[in-house]
Structure formats: structure tokens, C-alpha cells
Image (tube, grey):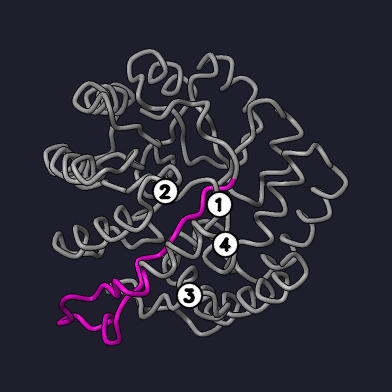
């Protein structure tokens, strides 16, 4: 099984490309498997350190079970163990999550990116027990805990991480955000869990804890991985001046991405904004957004398109 020491570098997060008409309520068989395989192969060949599929950006919430299985199998079979792969198995209940975990484990996935069941908000005890149960049930399947308070209606407080580190040994990393408490979190988990920030916080977090913060995630890699790979290499080399310059360039591309209402409004348009900027970048064909999340105001959409155009231009600088 993967260990915390295997988690380093750039983890690319991918969409689940869709066929024309996927935005319709009566659409069926919406996954563009050819494009999913092409995108996955391109990212592996580019030199990313790991892959994450079937999360929010992968539209896990709007795929049917059969579509989820097709997409998961496609990604696993394409990656073929060349880099660590975490496949999202989050669902509304533990029994369905167990079924999905078995499915990806049987096909050869290294791990699951796993969020909490969220129909009822979990208490601290519920959340810790959930990850402890999944760790016991699947001792050979690494877990990337999906720290998304907005989606899972749970704040993932420091006591949660301390208890998970003790009770769920297969939780080796988490899709996290920039966190001023990172040093305290590393201490209370005894270094057993790698906290992966978004690319926008990778430079800052690496300066705080350069020995631990050696990995980050980026949906931006699905617009072309070159700027993210350049940032990874600069951080790995300890070239902080170059890392800061790349961080500034990446920040420029993000200026138009978030809607005026900040993260609260972004939560309503997360999938839309990601897929729109992916398509605008030209690196992949993310395709139509599956309902009910295909609705988006034009002004917010245009911000995502500008982000995609800026990222495309930045690829030329670091390609």
C-alpha cells in the first residue's frame, strides 16, 4: 500500500469529460471515455506525480452508478500503476462507499479520495468512526481524505485529524487548503498524514514547512500541466525566487476565476467554472456540465473563460 512518503509533487485532478447533450435531464451514457483516456494518458506522460479522479471536478455527484464505474475503470486501466491514483468513491452512505471501494480495489487503484456522507452533517465522533471503519475494511487501499467543509458540512477541525491519525492508519494524505495551522496539524498527526494544499497555496505552505509540504493538488493541470510542473520543480529545488515568480504568474490567471461572492458563491458554481475554463484552455474537451449544475450566469462564466485563456498563455512561458 502507498505510504505518506509516496505522496509528493503534483497531483493532477481531472474532469469526467461528457458527450454532447450531457446537460439534458434525459441524457444517458454521458461519459466521453475516449477523451477521458486521452487526457489521463497525456497527464501521466507529462510527468505529474499522481492523479485524482472522480471528485467534485469529476462530477461524482451527477454520474449514474454505471457511468461512475465506466469512468473509474477507464482511468485505472489508463494509468496502469505508473503513478499513484486516487479514485473518488464518496457517496451518500457507507454501504455504497464500501461497494465502490471494492470496485476500484479489484481493478487496481492505489487509493480513494474519500469525503464524508453528507445528507446528515456528521459529528466529530461520526466522522472519525467513518474513516476508522474504512481503514479497517480496506487495509490495502490508501485514503486521501477529502477536506471540503462546504460539500460535506463538516469543518474538519484539528481534533479530527489527531484522532484519524491514531485510528485510521490508511489515511495517508488529505486534499486540503492553505492552512496557517499547518505546523500544528503536522505535529498532532505525527507526520502520518500529508496535507496537500491547492496550487495557489503551494508556495506559501512550502515556505512554512518545506520538509513536509512537498505535494500539492491542481485542477489547473487539466488546462495543461506545464506551469504546475514548473512550480513543483522550483519547490523541489528550493529555488524560492523562481517558485515565487511562478506563484505570482499563476495568481494572475486566477484573478477572474472566482465569482464576486467569493467561496460561498463559488460553491454553487464549482463544477461549471472548472469545466468552462478547461474547455477554454483547449487542453481537454471537458464537455457539457451535467444537471442540475449546468446553470450559470454569463458574467461568472466569462470570468472562467478568461482564466482558461490566461492559463493557456502561461503554458507557453513554462512549456
The vertical placement of 103 against 293, above or below, is above
For the residues labelled 2 and 3, the Cα–Cα distance comes to: 27 Å
Kindly identify which residue carries mark 1. 48
Mark 3 vs mark 1: give the one in front.
Answer: 1
- Residue 296 image-quadrant placement: bottom left
The vertical placement of 28 against 36, above or below, is below
The residue stretch that appears in magenta: 10-36
For the residues labelled 2 and 1, the Cα–Cα distance comes to: 28 Å
For the residues labelled 1 and 4, the Cα–Cα distance comes to: 12 Å
Kindly identify which residue carries mark 4. 220
User: Under tag 3, what secondary structure?
Assistant: loop
- Rendered location of residue 242, percent (x, y): 84, 50
Do residues under tags 2 and 1 come within 8 Å of each other at their CB atoms?
Answer: no
- Rendered location of residue 231, percent (x, y): 72, 51
Mark 2 vs mark 3: give the one in front.
Answer: 3
Mark 3 vs mark 4: give the one in front.
Answer: 3
Counting residues from the N terminus, which is met first, the one under dot 4 or under dot 2? 2
Amino acid at each position: 500500500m502507498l505510504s505518506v512518503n509516496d505522496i509528493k509533487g503534483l497531483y493532477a485532478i481531472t474532469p469526467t469529460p461528457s458527450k454532447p447533450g450531457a446537460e439534458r435531464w434525459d441524457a444517458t451514457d454521458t461519459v466521453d471515455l475516449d477523451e477521458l483516456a486521452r487526457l489521463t494518458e497525456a497527464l501521466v506522460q507529462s510527468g505529474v506525480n499522481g492523479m485524482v479522479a472522480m471528485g467534485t471536478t469529476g462530477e461524482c455527484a451527477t454520474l449514474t452508478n454505471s457511468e461512475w464505474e465506466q469512468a473509474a475503470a477507464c482511468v485505472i486501466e489508463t494509468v496502469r500503476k505508473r503513478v499513484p491514483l486516487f479514485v473518488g468513491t464518496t457517496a451518500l452512505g457507507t454501504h455504497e462507499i464500501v461497494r465502490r471501494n471494492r470496485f476500484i480495489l479489484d481493478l487496481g487503484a492505489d487509493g480513494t479520495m474519500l469525503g464524508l456522507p453528507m445528507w446528515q452533517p456528521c459529528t466529530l465522533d461520526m466522522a472519525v468512526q467513518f474513516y476508522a471503519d474504512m481503514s479497517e475494511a480496506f487495509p490495502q487501499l490508501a485514503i486521501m481524505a477529502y477536506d471540503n467543509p462546504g460539500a460535506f458540512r463538516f469543518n474538519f477541525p484539528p481534533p479530527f485529524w489527531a484522532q484519524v491519525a491514531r485510528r485510521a492508519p490508511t489515511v495517508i494524505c488529505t486534499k486540503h487548503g492553505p492552512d496557517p495551522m499547518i505546523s500544528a496539524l503536522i505535529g498532532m498527526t505525527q507526520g502520518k498524514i500529508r496535507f496537500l494544499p491547492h496550487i495557489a497555496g503551494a508556495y506559501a505552505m512550502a515556505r512554512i514547512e518545506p520538509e513536509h509540504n512537498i505535494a500539492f493538488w491542481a485542477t489547473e493541470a487539466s488546462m495543461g500541466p506545464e506551469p504546475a510542473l514548473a512550480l513543483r520543480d522550483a519547490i523541489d529545488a528550493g529555488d524560492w525566487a523562481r517558485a515565487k515568480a511562478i506563484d505570482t504568474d499563476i495568481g494572475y490567471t486566477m484573478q477572474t476565476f472566482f465569482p464576486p461572492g467569493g467561496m460561498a458563491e463559488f460553491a454553487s458554481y464549482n463544477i461549471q467554472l472548472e469545466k468552462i475554463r478547461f474547455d477554454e484552455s483547449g487542453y481537454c474537451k471537458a464537455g457539457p456540465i451535467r444537471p442540475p449544475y449546468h446553470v450559470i450566469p454569463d458574467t461568472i462564466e466569462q470570468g472562467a473563460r478568461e482564466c482558461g485563456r490566461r492559463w493557456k498563455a502561461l503554458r507557453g512561458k513554462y512549456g
